Amino acid sequence: MKTLRIGTRGSALALWQAQHVRARLARLGVEAELVVIKTSGDQFQSAQLATIGLKGVFIKELEDALLSGRVDLAVHSMKDVPTEIPEGLVIAAVCEREDVRDALVSRNGADLRTLPDGARIGTSSLRRQAQLLWFRRSLSVVPLRGNVDTRLRKLSAGEVDAIVVAKAGLDRLGASERITEVLSPEISLPAVGQGALGIECRADDRSVCELLEALDHPETRAAITAERALLAALQGGCQVPVGAWGRIQDGRLVLDAAVLASDGSACIRQQVADQPENAVAMGRRLAQSLLEAGADRLLQLAGRDLRSRS
C-alpha cells in the first residue's frame, strides 16, 4: 500500500493523536505521513467558541482535504465531530476510549469544593460552565479559549484561578501531574465523544476503510453511537449544555445524559440501558425522555443565550 497521508490540526494534542494513529498503522505494516491543516477553530482563538456560530469548527477543513484527495484519512477528537457527516465520508474507526472524565487544574491546589467563592474558572465549554455552576453557584466561570497547553499557560500567568479540561488531553500531553482533581461524572458528565479518537476517510476508499477496521473498538463505537444519536435527537452541536456518558457494564450499554441551563440554574438528568446493538434507538429514546421532562425549554434558553453573546 502507498504511504497514507494523515490530516491533522497543528496543536500539540492533535499532533499527538495523529502520531498515535500513525504508530498504530506502522504496527500493521503501513507507512503514513502527517499533513498539518489549519482549521476555523484554530483561527478564531480570541472568540468564545460558543459564539463562533459554526458546527465542526475544528474539522471542516480536514474534511475538505479528504474530499479533495489532499489527504487519505483524518484524525479527530470525537467530541469535535458533528453528528452529521458530509456525504462521501465515513468514520471508519473509533479507537478505544481513554478516560472520559473532566479534570480541574488550579493554581493553588484547591479542589472544586475548597476554591474560594468567586474563584475564576476558565473554560470554553457551555457544558462545563453549566455543570460547574449547578454544583457550586458561588464560582465565577469565564470564557477561556486556546489549546490545552495554551490554557495551562494562561492559568500559570494568573488569568484565571483554575481551568477544567478533558483528563484524556492532559494524559496525552504528559501533563497529568498538573491535575488537582479528577471530576466524577456525577459532578461533570463528559461531552459526547470525549476521550475517544475517530478516524475519518472517504467512503469509497475501500482499501483504507478495510485497513482502519483493525483500529476500531466495538465497545467504544457502541457507546459513542448512543451518545451521538442522543445529541442528534436533541438537535445539539458541541456547544450546547449537554453531557452524556455511554459505557458497557455487564454486557449492557448504559447511557447517562443531562441537559442544563447555561447558568447552572436547572438540570435534567436521566439514564437508560439496553443491548449494545440498540445504541441508536436507546440514544434517541433517552433524548425523547429528556425533552418530555423539559429539556427542550433549557435548550431553547441556551440558544437564545448564545445569540445574545454573538
Image: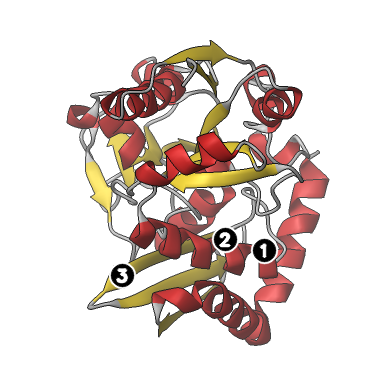
The answer to which of 48 and 57 lies nearer the viewer is 57
Q: Which amino acid lies under the numbered mark 2 shown in the image of this protein?
A: Arg
The answer to which of 299 and 271 lies nearer the viewer is 271
Q: Are marks 1 and 2 in contact (CB under 8 Å)?
A: yes
The CA distance from mark 1 to mark 2 is 6 Å
Q: Residue 232 carries which label?
A: 1
Q: In this view, does 102 lie to the left or right of 211?
A: left
The CA distance from mark 3 to mark 2 is 16 Å
Callout 1: SS: helix
Residue at 68 percent across and 59 percent down: it is: 236
Q: In which quarter of the image is residue 289?
A: bottom right
**Label 3: few (<14), some (14–19) or many (≥20) C-alpha neighbours in 10 Å:** some
Q: Which mark is residue 6?
A: none
The answer to which of 67 and 129 lies nearer the viewer is 67
Q: Which amino acid lies under the numbered mark 3 shown in the image of this protein?
A: Ile
Answer above or below: position of 75 versus 295. Answer: above
Q: Quadrant of residue 212?
A: top left
Q: Which amino acid lies under the numbered mark 1 shown in the image of this protein?
A: Ala
Say which residue label 2 marks. 228
Q: Which mark is residue 248?
A: 3
* Residue 34 point in image, percent of width and height: 48, 14
